[in-house]
Amino acid sequence: MDDPTEDGRARFAPLLDELARLRQVIAAREGEMSCLQALYELSRGTQRVSEEQLQRMVDLVPYGFLSPEQVSAQVRIFDDFSFSTHGFRDAPGVHATRIFWDEQEIGALSVRVTGPAGEALPISLEHQRFLSIVADRFGECIRLWSAEMEEERSKQRLVENDALRRDLDASRDRMSRLQLAVSELSVSITQIWDGVLFIPLAGVLDSVRAARFMEKSFNRVFEKEPYFVIVDIDGVDVIDQMTADYLVRVVHGFRFFGATGILTGIQPEVAKMTEEKNIRMDSIIIRRDLREGLRYCVQRMRAIRRREKPR
């Protein structure tokens, strides 16, 4: 005689199996809903998302599965940043869900489910749909995080630009002081004879040095009251048209202080340039070199003293 209990169990076995499956499905959906709720609570109402928040969100992903201890996850952004759960390995069997924002791919959510022996297990369609929803949430949060990162980069660039501008201003100030010091040294005025001042110029004579030369020479001529001022440009390598014209006017201007200006040591290149640019030098006294200039001064001084000598 058949056991009615065994017969009942056999008859209800399919129903019991279906009930267990439904319970498992419900448990899985409850896990997914709890995970989504936690993700929503973590990022709800915020206009800023930090790296710490993104890491906490990634840590929540495994809890959307029935066995969180078997799940590891990673979010990679722009191939530059990544946030991973403990033990995640980018190995075969990883399921990747692309992350989009405004129809532009900005990263990927990777999930790996392992079995008891460490083998990769497939991910069900239901879990794939769950991961798509999670990826959408990550897309919005990554957008906020990226905007904050860009804002921080902009602030850092402003700070760096301000520091660079201060360094540049300081360098310019040091350069100005150095140029002033060089200018002071490069305009040497010496009394080489009674009533004769000597001003040698060398190097590149630009507008800045020419202006300094005028200021310092006029002050010294006013102070010393010489009869003659010899300006020797034998060492001048380069001089432009404007500076050459300026130099001629300065030498000619010594007459306002009762002194005669004499220009010596004109190089062939400078003479050629003044001729080509039609710079008039016939209003000043020009001699070949310092020796000839000094000879002219001595001769004129003797003539002056003879005139001044009482008869």
Image: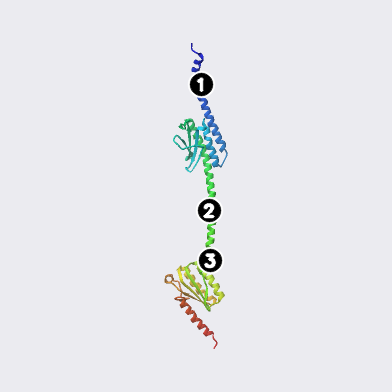
Classify residue 57 as left or right of residue 269. right
- Residue picked out by circle 1: 16
Q: Does 163 appear above or below 181?
A: above
User: In this figure, which residue is indicated by the disc labeled 3?
Assistant: 181
User: From where the camera sits, is residue 38 visible?
Assistant: yes
Q: Nearer the viewer, residue 163 or 190?
A: 190
Q: How far apart are the two marked residues, 1 and 2, measured between alpha carbons?
A: 72 Å
Foreground label between 2 and 3 = 3
Question: Which residue is at a point 55% across and 40% down the rendered structure image?
Answer: 53
For residue 289, what is the image quadrant?
bottom left
Residue bearing mark 2:
161
User: Residue 72 at x, y = what percent?
Assistant: 50, 35
Q: Nearer the viewer, mark 1 or mark 2?
A: 1
Q: Position of residue 64 (x, y in %)?
A: 52, 32
Farthest residue toward the top? 1
Going by the numbered disc 3, the residue's amino acid type is: Ala
Q: Of label 3 and label 1, which has the lower sequence position?
A: 1
Q: Earlier in the sequence, mark 2 or mark 3?
A: 2
User: Tag 2: residue type?
Assistant: Asn
